[in-house]
Amino acid sequence: MNHYHTPRFRFSLPLPWVRGLILLIGSLLFVVLSAPMVAAATARHYTELEFPPLRAVEMPNYERYTMANGIVVYLMENHELPLVSGQASFRTGSRLEPSDQVGLASLTGTVLRSGGTEDRTPDEINQFLEQRAASVETSIGDAVGNASFDSLTADLPDVLNLFAEILQKPAFRANQIDLAKQQLGGAIARRNDNPNDITSREFSKRIYGPDHPYGRTVEHRTLANIAPEDLIQFYQQSFRPEQMLLGIVGDFQPQPMKALLAQAFGDWQQVAAPPLPPLPTVEQANLGGTFFIEQPQLTQSHIALGHLGGQLNDPDYAALSLMNGVLNGFGGRFFNELRSRQGLAYSVYGFWSPRFDYPGLFIAGGQTRSEATVPFIESLRREIDRIRTAPVTAAELDYAKESILNSFVFNFQSPSQTLSRLMRYEYYDYPADFIFSYQRAIQNTTATDILRAAEKYLKPEELTTLVVGNSGAIEPPLASIKGDVVALDITIPPPQ
Amino acid sequence: MQPYIDRVANNITEFTLDNGLNVIVLERHEAPVVSFATYADVGGADEPDGQTGVAHFLEHLAFKGTTRIGTRDYEQEAPLLDRLDELFEQRRAAQAAGDTAKAEALNAEFEQVQQEAAAIAIQNQFGQIVEQAGGVGLNAATSADYTLYTYSLPANKLELWMSLESERFLDPVFREFFEEQQVILEERRWRTDNSPIGQMVEAFLDAAFQVHPYRRPVIGYNEDIRNLTRQNVQDFFDLYYVPNNLTLAIVGDVDPAQVRQLAEVYFGRYAAKPAPPQVQLVEPPQTAPRSVTLSLDSEPWYLEGYHRPNGMHPDSMAYDLMASILSSGRTSRLYKSLVEEQRLALGAAGYGGFPGDKFPNLLLFYALTAPGVELDAVAAALHGEIERLKQERVTATELERVKKQAQAGLLRSLASNGGMARLLAEYQGKTGSWRNLFDQLTKIEAVTPADIQRIARATFRPENKTVGQLIRTQD
C-alpha cells in the first residue's frame, strides 16, 4: 500500500517458459562459453562497452518416474537451504464444473485443505503446520487443480505425510464448507467495489459469453445449488492418483524420498466416480461492439478492447510474442505513445495473451481521465492498425528479439522454476523442450513474419470495446465511435 | 538456521567509496545472473510542505535519461526544456490573473514547444537499453521512507549496470516533465481518487498523524502534483541524491573485487556532498481517540490504528511478533475469532510499519465485514482480542510458533537475488548496517510473553487510537 511502482504493464503475459525445462536426466550445459572479465579503468558510456560471454548455465539434475497407481513424480535436489517444497497438479478445473453450480470447483479446492481429514480436525492441522513454519495449500483454478507444501528439512516426513493425508482422506467438514461459502458470498457482494475488477471480469464475459465456462462468474444462486455431496463428488472426480503430477524440490536425498512417497501415496487407489466432462468449445460471443458500464463516481475510465486470441502452440506464437514486445515494455509503442508522449495513462498495454489448451485473448487497454476516453480508444486502435499494416522497423525488431533472447537466462534461475515449467508442459501435453523451440523460433522470426501474423491474428472488425466510467464526463461521448453503445447492468443479483 | 545465515553473511563484502557511497555485495553463484538495488534514503516524509509527491515524481523522471541517453541532441533540447518551464509559469500567472486570452495563447505556444522537445527526445530509451540487454524487473518504488530502484541483468553485463546506473544519477535530465505530470495524475486517480480504500487510507493517515509527515500521501496531493516544477525536482535531487545518502546492493554471480574496482571507476565520479537534512518533526503523543468516516460506493471496511515506535526501537520485534500472533495464518487470533468462529469478517489482520518504519508509525488493523455485519460488531470483536493481549500473557506455544515463522521467513528470503538486494540495501540504508537484517534472529529469540503484554498495555489505550470507517453511500 505504501509503494508506488512504475510498472511496464498491469496485465502480465502468461509466460509459460518462465518456469520449466528439458526432459533429460543429467547435467546439461546450454551455453558453453567462458572468458576472463575485462574491466574498465575509466568510466565508459554504455555504447562503448563490450561484454564477455555469459557463463554456462548448469541445468539441475532431476528424476522422473511413475508410481504403480499412476502418480507421475519429479524429484529435484537442491541443498542450498534446509527447505523442501512440493507441488502437485491434478487434471480438473472450474471450466469443468456444472453451469448451475459455478463456484463448486473453487469451494472444493478451498475446503479440501480447510475442512480437515478423517483423522485430524482443521485446528489440529493448522496448528501442526504453523507450529513448524510449514504450509499445505490446495486450490482449483480454471484449468488445473493445485496442491503444494513447504517445509523445513527437519520436519519433512511429518509435513509430507500430512500433505498426503489431506489429498487422500479429506473430511469436508460442514462448518468449513459454510465458512467457504460465506467467503465466496462476501466476495460477490464486494466485486463491484473496484473498477479494475469490474473491467477484467466483464470483458471476459463479452468475449467468451456470460454463461460460458471461461466467462461466467459465481453467483448467490449458483452457490445455493451446491451441497456437501457435490464437493465430495467433484473432489473424487478431480483428485485422483492417475490425474496427479507431483514435483518435489529441495534439500532431500532421493532414496529416502522415494520410500517416503511410496509409503505416503502408494496405497492411494482410484475410486469409482463419473468422469469429468470434456473441455468446452470456444467461440467469440460478441464480434465487435462497444459496451458501457456506468459508474458515476469515477473520474477515470477503465478501458479494455480486444477479441478472442489463441494458444501457445500456434505456429505463429513466436511472431506474436515479438509483436507483443514491439507494442509493450519501456521501448514499446503503447508505452512510448500513449503514456510518455501523450500522457494519457499510467497503465497502458496491448497483448496477444495465449493459453495452453484453449484460445486466450487479444486485449488492449488501460485507464485514462474521463474526458480522454475516446482519444485513448482511438490511439489504441491506431496502434493496432499500424502494427498490422506496416512492418516493424529493424530497431524495433532488434529491441523485441534481443529483449527475449538476452533475458533467456532468467528462465533458469532456480531449480524450482525449472521443475514448475517441466510439470506445466507435461500437464498440457507440450513437448518438454518447448521453451527451446520457442527460443529458436524467436531467433528465426523476421519483420515480415510479424506483419503477416499481426495481419492474420488481429481483427479490427472484431474488436469488442468495454468502458467502465462516468458517461457525464466522457466528452466527446462514446457514441462518437462508430456503432451503438450497449449499456450493461452489473447490479448483483441478491441471494434468494 | 544460524549456520545458513552465517554462511550468507560470510559471502557479503561491504565497502564505502571515498565520496561516502555504501556498497554491499552478496555472492551467489547459483545462476549467471545478478540483481541490483539502488537505495536512496529519501521518501515522501522528507518532502517540503506544498511539494508532496516530489520524491515519487523524481522517481518517475529517473527513467527519462541523461544528457546522452534519451535525446537526439541535448544542446538543442535543453533550451526548449527551459522555455517550457517559463511558459508553464507564465500560463499559471495568466490563469491566476483571470486573463483567459493570454493563457490560451501561452498554452498554444507551450504545446508547440512541447512537440519540438518531444521530437528531440527518445522516449524511454533508458528502459529500452536495459531490456534489450536482457534486463528484467526494471522498476522503482517510492515509500514514505525511501526510494528504491531495481533490476537484474545477465551476470556478464555487470559493467552495463555500473555505466547506466551511475550515469542515471550523475547526469540526469528531467525531460518530459509535463507529460509525466499527467501520467502521475492518472496514477493518483487510479490508486486513490477512484479507489474507495485508497481514499480511506489517505483520510485515515491524515487523522492519525497531526504533525509528522507520515500524515501525507506519498503520491502527493492533487494540487501539489499540479504545482510541482522541474526546479522543485532538481532541488530535491541535489539535496538528497548525494553519495552518502545512497546505498547500492549487488547480489548474484559476481566477483566482489571486480565490483569494487568498477564501483570506484563509475560511482567514484560522484562528488562528495554534505549529509542531507533529516526529518525533525516529531508526532506528539496522542491524547484523545480520533476517528474518520467516509461514505463511498463500496462495501464496508473497518480500520483501526495505534501509534507504535520505529523499526529500530528495542521493542520493535515484540510488536512484529504480537502482530503475527494476531494476524498471521489460520491459527492467528483474529482469523480464528473474527473470521472462523464469529463469522463477522471476511478477513481481519493488523501489521506495524504503516506507512513506514523509519519513524514512529502505526500498528494498523483492518477488517472487511462479512455480508450483513455492522462495523460496530467487528470493532467490538477486535477489541475483545486486543483486551485479551492486555489481560493475559500469550502462551509459550503461540510465541514459539510466530518466532519459528519469523526465523523461517528470513531463511526463505535468502533464496532470491532480487529480494536479498532489496533487503540488504534497505537495512544498510535505513538502519546503518546490513547486519541488522541477520541480527533479527537474536532479537526474535529475546522476546518474552511479558514483553508482549507490556507493549500491548502501553499501546492499546483509547487515547492512542484512530478509527477509520468506510461505509456504503445510501442511494
Image (cartoon, coloured by chain):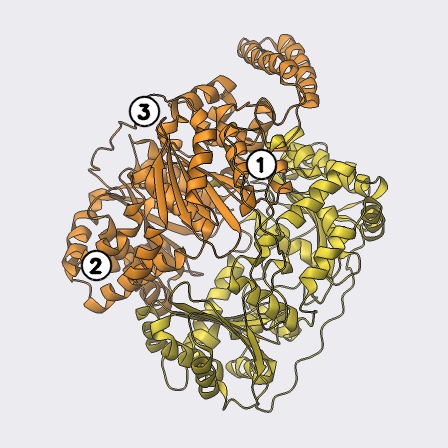
Chain colours: A yellow, B orange
Say whether marks 3 and 2 touch (CB < 8 Å).
Answer: no
Frontmost of labels 1 and 2 is: 2
Residues indicated by labels 1 and 3 sit on the same polypeptide chain: no
Amino acid type of the residue tagged 1 in the rendering: Thr
Element class at badge 1: loop
Callout 2 secondary element: helix
| Kind of residue indicated by mark 2 | Glu
Q: CA–CA distance between discs 3 and 2?
A: 35 Å
Q: Is residue B362 left or right of residue A457?
A: left
Q: Position of residue A494 (x, y in %)?
A: 55, 62
The first of marks 3 and 2 along the sequence is 3
Q: Is residue B76 left or right of residue B206?
A: right
Residue highlighted by disc 3: B275
Is residue A441 found left or right of B94 in the rendered image? right
* Label 2 packing within 10 angstroms: few (<14), some (14-19), many (20+): few
Query: Counting other residues with Cα less than 10 Å from the Cα at mark 1, is it few (<14), some (14-19), or many (20 or more)?
Result: many
Q: Quadrant of residue A398?
A: top right
Q: Which mark is residue B445?
A: 2
Figure label count: 3
Q: Nearer the viewer, residue B82 or B424?
A: B424
Q: Is residue A46 above or below residue A458?
A: above
Percent position of residue A413, x then y: 53, 57
Q: CA distance from mark 1 to mark 3?
A: 42 Å
| Chain at tag 2 | B
Q: Name the image quarter holding the N terminus of chain B.
A: bottom left
Spatial distance from mark 1 to mark 2, Cα to Cα? Answer: 50 Å
User: Is there any visible trace of residue A127 in the rendered image?
Assistant: yes
Q: Which mark is residue A345?
A: none
Residue beneath disc 1? A299
Q: Position of residue B95 (x, y in %)?
A: 56, 12
Q: Is A461 above or below relative to A105?
A: above
Say left or right for B409 vs A465. Answer: left
